[in-house]
Image (cartoon, grey):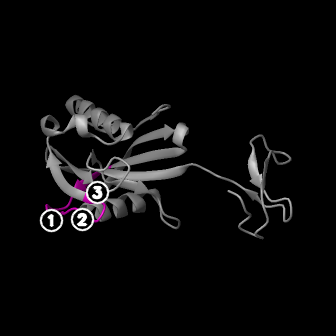
Amino acid sequence: MNFCSECGSAVLVRIPDGDHMPRHVCPDCGTVHYQNPKMVVGCIPEWDDKILLCRRAIEPKYGLWTLPAGFMENGETTLEGAMRETWEEAGARIEPGALYTLYNLPHINQVYLMFRARLLDLDYQPGIESLEARLFTEDEIPWEEIAFRTVRATLEQYFRDRRAGRFDFHFGDIRTR
């Protein structure tokens, strides 16, 4: 950030009074510009013993597989965002379930929230950000072509829980790329 979005003056990086982190601060109007983690929300769309994955049509990780997920928008809840992303990326109608995983990625300032969801029908199709949308059994999942560590960790946990016959909430930190 170079300029204040309130008054247009050049900003400085300093620790504001009463704070402990360096922030972009406008020396003219006093506005402190906070930068906070981005929320990524998505779903694990289930149909019988299969999971719906999308092959990415955008960077990063073009051509690799992921669960339908993306950045939360202002004015929506985490669940609304997860449902929107599932619709945008896979054209899938879902019945949302419980929050399933939360992963912190402090090295890229993101928090991933993934919900379990039940597909309402098989009338899905890839959205503009997906090359393909397809159902996979655990044995069919292209593990070496999964786009993100958060998605891999979520899927691995999901199949462990399914084998155990019990789905719990899971959270953790992924600290390196």
* Percent position of residue 68, x then y: 31, 53
Can the viewer see residue 104? yes
In the image, residue 13 above or below residue 140: below
Mark toward the viewer: 3 or 1:
3
Q: Which residue is drawn at 30% across and 50% down?
A: 62
Q: Which structural element holds mark 3? A: loop
* Percent position of residue 76, x then y: 48, 65
**The N terminus sits in image quarter:** bottom right
* Percent position of residue 141, x then y: 18, 39
- Labelled pair 1, 2 in contact (Cβ < 8 Å): yes
Q: Name the residue under label 3.
A: 57
| Mark 3 neighbour density, 10 Å: few (under 14) some (14–19) many (20 or more) | some
Foreground: 71 or 44? 71
Seen in the image, is 24 located left or right of residue 115? Answer: right
In the image, residue 128 above or below residue 114: below
Where, by quadrant of the figure, is residue 150 drawn?
top left
The residue range painted magenta reads: 116-130
**The C terminus sits in image quarter:** top left
Rounded to the nearest angstrom, the CA distance separating label 1 from label 2 is 8 Å
* Percent position of residue 2, x then y: 71, 58
- Labelled pair 3, 2 in contact (Cβ < 8 Å): no
Membership of 123 in magenta stretch: yes
Mark 1 or mark 2: which comes first in sequence?
Answer: 2
User: Which label number is shown at residue 42?
Assistant: none
Where, by quadrant of the figure, is residue 10 drawn?
bottom right
Q: Which structural element holds mark 2? A: loop
Q: Name the residue under label 1.
A: 123
Amino acid type of disc 1? Asp
Mark 3 or mark 1: which comes first in sequence?
Answer: 3
| Mark 2 neighbour density, 10 Å: few (under 14) some (14–19) many (20 or more) | many
Q: Name the residue under label 2.
A: 91
